[in-house]
Image (spheres, coloured by chain):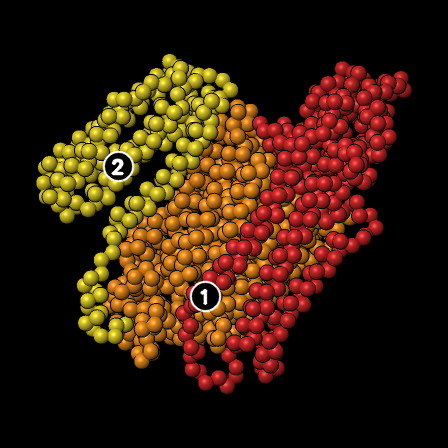
Chain colours: A yellow, B red, C orange
Amino acid sequence: MSSTSSAATSIELNWVLPQRGHVGMLSLIAAELAIFTIFVVAYLFYIGKSLTGPLPKDVLELPIFATICLLSSSATIHFAVRALQNGKVRAFGTWWFATMALGFIFLGETGREWHHLIYEKGLTISTNLFGTTYYSLVGLHAFHVTVGLICLAIAMVLTLLGKVKQSHGDRVDVFSLYWHFVDAVWIVVFTVVYVIGR
Amino acid sequence: MRETYEKLQAQLRIRKPLVVFVFLSGCLFPVQAAFGNPADSSQIPNMFKPVSTPAHSIFHLSLFVLTICAVIFAVVFSLLVYSIVKFRRRPGDDGREPPPIYGSNQVELAWTVIPVLIVLVLFLATARVIHAVQSASKPAEAVEVIAIGHQFWWEFHYPGLGVVTANELHVPVSDPAHPTPTFITLLSADTDHSFWIPQLAGKTDLIPNRVNHTWIDPNETGMFVGQCAQYCGTQHAKMLLRVYVDSPDQFKQWVLAQTQPAQVSDAVNEGRRVFETTACINCHAISGTVADGRFGPDLTHLMSRETIASGAATNTHENLQLWIQNPDAIKPGSLMPAMKLNERDLAAVTAYLETLR
Amino acid sequence: MASESITLTAVQEMPRPIGSVLHDWVVTVDHKKLGILYILYALVFLVIGGIEATIMRIQLIVPHNSFVSPQVFNRMFTMHGTTMIFFAAMPILFGFGNYLIPLMIGARDMAFPRLNAWSFWLTAFGGLLLYFSFVGANGLYGAGNAPDVGWFAYAPLTSRAFSVGHSTDFWTLGLLVSGFGSIGTAINILTTIVCMRCPGMTLGKMPLLVWLNLVMAAMVLLAISPLTAAQIMLSLDRFLGAHFFDTQAGGSAVMWMHFFWIFGHPEVYVLVIPAFAFVSEIIPVFSRKPIFGYPVMVAATIAIGFVGFSVWAHHMFTVGMNPYANSFFTITTMVIGVPTGIKIFNWIGTMWGGKIHFATPMLFCIAFLFQFLIAGLTGIMLAASPFDWQLGNSYFVVAHFHYVIVGAILFALFGAFYYWFPKMSGKMYNERLGKLHFWFFLIGFHLTFDSMHIPGLLGMPRRIYTYEPGRGWDIWNLICTIGVFFQILGTAVFVGNLLWSLFKGKAAGNDPWDAWTLEWSTSSPPVEYNFAEIPVVRSRRPLWDIKHPEDPDWQYE
């Protein structure tokens, strides 16, 4: 294939392409972004169009605590990844656990909010357009948080079993891309549902 | 055998573009047919024979677009034919590779700029027609119709005239000097439908929870056909449309007849009793009687219509009786249930309906 | 790269028990086997979709025919469209991409081999789920059975009120599942192309097929997801009583249309761009010249990729959008004709000054050029929205898109089959039968789809199980149906040729076409690891450089 072997070797030595894991995860994130965009568009379009109540301003309260937890978990996972890349497995484990805990709290808060909305305010997915778009958008996000938590838990178990090493730094970095994406989506959902839509 | 085949192959290779060309030119015949004059041309919903302004505008735009496309086709087709004929590998070729040409910036520029200009011209011509048709204002003399699409029939109200009818629309002819167009508001009671009579206007959809508008101003009397053009369920195919363009006098007469209450005749009392005590009145309305159902067509002036079942059958005694007894025989999957009347009741009801002129 | 070390004669293995061979194929993660699985799966559904089309055409051969009931006919057009797009066209194109991309970029496999297998089996399962509806979907009043809501399933026809039983749910869920498979394959293709090219193969030196599949994969990621979202919404409506498309609760039927066509229009570019890719590889080889204007071809494809996401509402010109919206979508739709036309000119430029050899793959590509030209022009007609107010939802549209999908995409696919069959199987197909297939199919295609334009121009709407006589449509429907039988004949010759050649064809050798991209440097079929040594390339035609060391491409590119 090569004309002179030295030209070939120099091409080979300088040949660096992006990493598969990162490119793959970014592609997945692009696809997920498109799905969320459609749900956000539906939410925005249907603001004010419900034929019956309850209305957002009657029932929605700002989930400040849950938001702080979720956004902090982006910071903790960042520290976790850095720790592992520097070979500090125990520090990694601690930060990773913190990320998981904050994620669980967020999910718990969402559950509490839904319980309140369903049983005390009478808002379900079939009540009106607001109920439909609210539960589907927040629910889609919560589903993605859940999937992330499952992955976090699996990694946590593997860490406790001592199977996680510095060489896995790249893999947790790829996963952290997903987790950051989930947090970024929450910022959008929060703005659309609790700020614009109320 | 093999030699003949190879010779045939060689000949075909050269003649193929010719064959394709002849075939495609043959396709011009149907275009001629579209413009030709068959005996009963009002039965052919031919957009190239418009009788109303929106259809006229579209027709003229379409000629412009077709001409441009034909020119583009002729140019590119010729280039294609030329290249495969001139640059084919000849028998006895020496096997040397032809000079590799990687590209040419000038040529690429040329065949980018020219298409962009064509697109610009096409777009400007098109935008004019879009606005002309969609932003037309409604004159005071316009006839107003509200069309409600159902599975699988058309409901027509004339709010200004107090007329309620179904499936066959009557409108007055419009004199270009003093236009009397018909403006139609389009609603739907169930799923999506589309109102399409090619000689009168382009199609516009009827969508539930949405109000659409269209307008026509036919300048010729006659009957023009069309049908629902958005798949709406099992009997979408037989949701036919007829528009009768009447002279001003004919239209006045029609409106007068339509605003009378239902004719009453003692001879069909039994049929009327069957009608009013069976489930018929749940769906159908006959003005001046207890029947005021809105789910099916208004039958007050049923016999003023030439067809039944939204055009699926002509309005004859046999068809009417069959439709009542077993609608699936005419329009399987329509929402009219088989009434399962005995023979006496069936004959009586049919006789009653036939008095509703 | 030492091509000598590649031409190992395959070691003769003892014939293995059939169970072991089948097991190999089921658990494989090899991109070549998965590619072939995709292609075979798609061929089966191509035939099934063809049967559904034949049933429809027989029903429409004369007015007021009673070959099938309206209920069956409506299921036929729904299943035909859904099958052909999701379970014939997409899998077959993914299959070719899967097979060829690693070979063409000098890699040993795709970036994520297990994801590759998972995506294939998910897509396969989706198709089976859809077809299970024929037996499993019965609901109230025996309603249900296969879905009958049209392949674009407009709301509110798909609501529980109007679609009783579960037929619509099989449509939704079958496609949802296969959609995840498509996204998986797209991630794989994109990552493979970005991260696994052999040394020296910069983005500007990839074969055009690889570039076009990169654009296609990126489009899939952004286009399939809106459909997934809309189907989730529809399922929430149907199962949990949500109101996304419930017009009685203030929901919007038009919103489904927007979401569907934001998927649906880019989807057709997802289908046609790989067809462009095949043609861009085959025409140069059989004209004996490099592709004319490689950088412009790349730029045009990227332009199509972007602009393709801005045209979707040209499927909704009759919905009653305001004139400004109609004008916007008119101009974007017309604009996309420019890069598309540029590609046609570049293909002609490739043939110009060459020495064209009319082997079967080239015949199909030449027909592609004629037919894609016509398809593009009828597209321009439809882009003029007032013209679309007449032509939309009529048989003119059906003729237009079949001209693209059959006349362009399927013809390019046939060309690709004949071109790469020797590489995949190691055998040459029978050239005479190949040409016979071509002529039968060409005649059938034109009989059917040329004549189909006329009823559309004369007012015949689509999706009708029968029509009124005397509207000027009768003769054209008749001719249209007659063409179907020529196409069936052609397809039968095709399948017979491939099967016969698989067993009795002459050995093909590595490079039967004297071509220039990396896949032709491997054995036919390639060994499992593709290349003994990962190649190093210096130009877009690495094999040309080897065969013509005195005049290599990299001196001129």
| Residue A74 place in picture, x, y as percent | 22, 34
Q: Quadrant of the C terminus of chain C?
A: bottom left
Please give the residue where the numbered disc 1 appears in the rendered image: B106
Image check: A21 left or right of C210?
left
Q: Which residue is more in the foreground, A19 or C70?
A: A19
Name the chain under label 1: B
Please give the residue where the numbered disc 2 appears in the rendered image: A180
The answer to whether the residues at label 1 and label 2 have Cβ atoms under 8 Å apart is no
| Residue C444 place in picture, x, y as percent | 62, 62
| Residue C283 place in picture, x, y as percent | 46, 68
Q: Residues within 10 Å of mark 1 (few under 14, many from 20)?
A: few
Residue type, label 1: Gln
Q: Quadrant of the N terminus of chain C?
A: bottom left
Residue A116 against residue A145 in the figure, above or below: above
Residue C531 against residue C259 in the figure, above or below: below
Q: Which residue is more in the foreground, B47 or A133?
A: B47
Q: Residues within 10 Å of mark 2 (few under 14, many from 20)?
A: some
Q: Which residue is more in the foreground, B306 or A7?
A: A7
Residue type, label 2: His
Image check: B119 left or right of C204?
right
Judged from the image, the secondary structure of the residue bearing numbered disc 2 is helix
The residue located at (28%, 33%) in the rendering is A183
The residue located at (47%, 75%) in the rendering is C354
